[in-house]
């Protein structure tokens, strides 16, 4: 029932859901004792980056990832909601003393090379070998297409129609 109430509330106040979940994320990060974090969302995805015990972590989610699992998310804001709720679940687990946070987030660790290098860094070298002069007569055709002369301004009447003599 709690989930149903939340969905009804968010449908009634669609512009406030961003503020609600940004505040919720701030609260979750405080509970996890994480001061240095960044997040962003767009039309179809979102991410949350944070530093915990001097190690960088990144959580990402997208509508495509959710769709592959049979979950419908409208946009990146829904993805941010999902990630925030996942972090909140981690809060509950760590607050119970079940495991430490670093145990759960170890798979989200960012490598230092991923932070510093661009996404694509490949370089291609293409060599061309000349085949000599090629004789293709179909490409050497010089045809002209006869065009009708452009009408002058004097040939237009008041309605913008061209006044041409009738052909018989």
Image (cartoon, grey):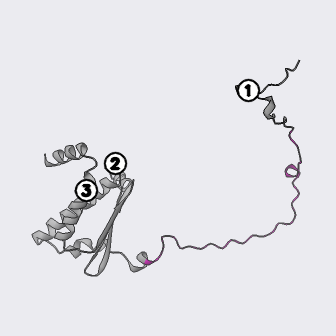
Magenta-highlighted stretch: main secondary structure? Answer: loop
Q: Which mark is residue 99?
A: none
Assign a secondary structure to mark 1.
loop
98 or 10: which is nearer to us?
10
Bounds of the magenta span? Answer: 116-145
Estimate the x, y position of residue 3 in percent, counting from the top left.
17, 48
Pointer 1 local density, CA inside 10 Å: few below 14, some 14–19, many at least 20: few
Q: Along the line of sight, which residue is nearer the eye, 143 or 127?
A: 143
Residue indicated by mark 3: 19
The residue mark sitting in front, 3 or 2, is: 3
How many neighbours does mark 2 have within 10 angstroms: few (below 14), some (14-19), or many (20 or more)? few
Q: Which residue is mark 2?
A: 74
Give x and y (percent) for residue 31.
16, 69
Give the SS element for disc 2. Answer: loop
Q: Is residue 27 magenta?
A: no
As drawn, 162 above or below 52: above
Lower sequence index among marks 3 and 2: 3
Residue 91 percent coordinates (x, y): 17, 67
Q: Mark number for residue 161? A: 1
């Amino acid at each position: 029932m709690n989930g149903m109430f939340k969905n009804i509330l968010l449908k009634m106040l669609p512009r406030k859901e961003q503020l609600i979940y940004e505040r919720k994320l701030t609260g979750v990060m405080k509970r996890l004792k994480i001061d240095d974090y960044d997040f962003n969302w767009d039309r179809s995805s979102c991410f949350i980056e944070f530093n915990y015990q001097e190690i960088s972590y990144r959580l990402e989610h997208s509508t495509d990832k959710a769709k592959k699992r049979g979950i419908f998310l409208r946009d990146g804001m829904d993805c941010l909601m999902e990630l925030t709720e996942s972090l909140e679940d981690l809060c509950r687990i760590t607050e119970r003393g079940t495991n430490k946070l670093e145990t759960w987030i170890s798979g989200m660790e960012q490598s230092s090379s991923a932070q510093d290098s661009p996404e694509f860094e490949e370089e291609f070298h293409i060599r061309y070998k000349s085949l000599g002069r090629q004789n293709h007569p179909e490409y050497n055709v010089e045809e002209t297409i006869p065009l009708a002369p452009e009408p002058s301004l004097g040939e237009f009447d008041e309605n913008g129609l061209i006044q041409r003599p009738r052909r018989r």
